[in-house]
Image (cartoon, rainbow, N blue to C red):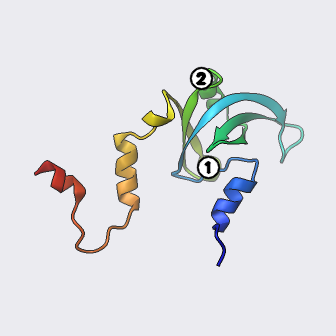
Amino acid sequence: MTEISLKDYINEASTFLRIHPGETVYCQYLGYKVVPNRFDPEAKSVQYILVVNGIEKTFESRSINLAEQFSEIPEGSWVKITRTGEGSKTKYKVEAVSSPDEEITDDDLNEIDKRVTKPAGSPDPKKETQA
């Protein structure tokens, strides 16, 4: 067996940030540059420069809506990027966060609860704290 999963290897080795549908990523926004689109050299894309888990990554998009959101965020800020939808229906929401310590909201915790499979018969921590 290997010590690192393929998913972790891809995330560490890639210089590009990938955000999957329904995923939220917390990172520091360093700036952007306008570059030729990798798939259509006649078109332009915005390449956002981000630091994710201490590793500098780029995130490229042609979305005007995404550019408008980033235009409101000062370089050097911590941001929360959430992707919804797939393909041509992909949407991104970018929010500035004060610091990495303030990244997790009640909505985030509820989403985590939905994704975590609890062993049968395990107590519900929310019910215990309400008693």
In the rendered image, the vertical position of residue 12 relative to residue 41, given as above or below:
below
Picture residue at 14% right of the left edge, 49% below the top:
130
Separation of residues labelled 1 and 2 (CA atoms) = 19 Å
Q: In screen coordinates, is 25 left or right of 56?
A: left
Quarter occupied by residue 26: top right
Mark 1 — residue?
A: 19
Disc 2 secondary structure class? loop
Q: What residue sits 45% from the left and 35% below the top?
A: 101
Whether residue 9 is situated above or below residue 25 in the rendered picture: below
Q: Residue furthest right?
A: 41
| Residue in the picture at 59% in, 47% down | 89
Q: Residue furthest bottom?
A: 1
Q: Amino acid at mark 1?
A: Ile
- 101, 91: nearer the viewer: 101
Question: Who's the residue at 38% across and 39% down the image?
Answer: 105
Q: Residues within 10 Å of mark 1 (few under 14, many from 20)?
A: some
Q: Nearer the viewer, residue 16 or 3?
A: 3
Write down the quadrant of residue 57 in the picture: top right
**Side (left or right) of 22 relative to 39:** left
Question: Which of 70/128 is in front?
Answer: 128
**Residue 23, position as x, y percentages in the image:** 53, 50
User: Of callouts 1 and 2, which one flags the residue occurring earlier in the amino acid sequence?
Assistant: 1
Q: Can you give x and y, in whole percent of width and height, for residue 119 in the image?
A: 31, 72
Q: Could you say whether the residue bearing mark 1 is in a helix, strand or loop?
A: loop
Q: Tell me which amino acid carries mark 2.
A: Ile
Q: Nearer the viewer, residue 25 or 9?
A: 9
- Of all residues, the one furthest to the front in this rendering is 3
| Image quadrant containing the N terminus | bottom right
| Residue hosting label 2 | 73
* x, y percent for residue 53: 61, 45
Percent from the top left, x then y, of residue 83? 55, 45
In the image: residue 46, left or right of residue 70 = right
